[in-house]
Amino acid sequence: MTLGAWPLAPGETSTLRGLPEQQAFGAAWAALPPGSVLFLEGELGAGKTSLTQGLAQALGFTEPVTSPTYALMNLYPTPAGTLLHVDAYRVRDPAELYEMDLEALIEGSRLSVIEWGERLYADYPEAPVLHLEHMKSPETRQVTRRR
């Protein structure tokens, strides 16, 4: 895996072989400007949380990073600022997240990662969208930047 000045341009695809490459790819997104949102989409087990783990490590967070499936939101304090990790899979209406102060949490975070956030894309039109998918090899993932 080769990462240039930026991990992927819109429309580009990369193959990630194994957890270390998935996490290294996630770490590269720590270069997003403060206050940025990054959307992750893909089936269960496609590597969304693995990518977020690498991003959190790049920001200096040393504790375990887990999927916020049941909590909906996890906040990770890092030396670079807070990493907000949102899982919108079980959310019926995006208003539920806004009622949990999503907008203020994003504004106050160094970076925000939102999994399953398709219904929020229009609210954050500049945010990159990464689609992750399983490949034939169990350890291989393909990631495509949708925008």
Image (cartoon, rainbow, N blue to C red):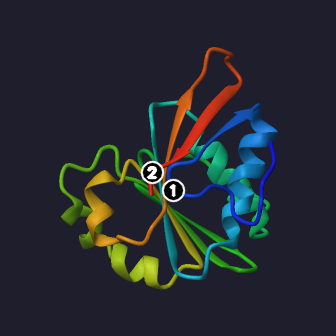
Q: Amino acid at mark 2?
A: Arg
Write the residue at 35% across / 54% down.
Answer: 117
Count of numbered tags = 2
Residue 37 placement (x, y as % from top left): 48, 69
Image quadrant where one finds the C terminus: bottom left
**57 up-or-down from 36: above or below:** above
Establish if 20 lies above or below 79.
above
Q: Which mark is residue 44?
A: none
Q: Which residue has dot 2 on it? A: 146
Image point 26% across, 71% down: which residue?
98
Residue 51 coordinates in the image, percent (x, y): 65, 48
Residue 64 visible in the shown view: no
Element under disc 1: loop
> Which residue was labeled with disc 1?
10
Q: Quadrant of residue 45?
A: top right
Q: Is residue 105 left or right of residue 124?
A: right
| Mark 2 surroundings within 10 Å by alpha-carbon count, few (fewer than 14), some (14 through 19), many (20 or more) | some
Q: Residue at x 63, y 53 (%)?
A: 52
Label 2: state its secondary structure: loop
Residue 75 place in picture, x, y as percent: 55, 67
Q: Quadrant of residue 120?
A: bottom left
Q: What residue lies at 45% left-to-right and 84% top-to-bottom?
A: 107
Q: Does residue 108 appear to the left or right of 34 in the view shown?
A: left
Does label 2 or label 1 sit earlier along the sequence? Answer: 1
Label 1 crowd bin: few (<14), some (14–19), many (20+), radius 10 Å: few
Label 2 with label 1: CB-CB less than 8 Å = yes
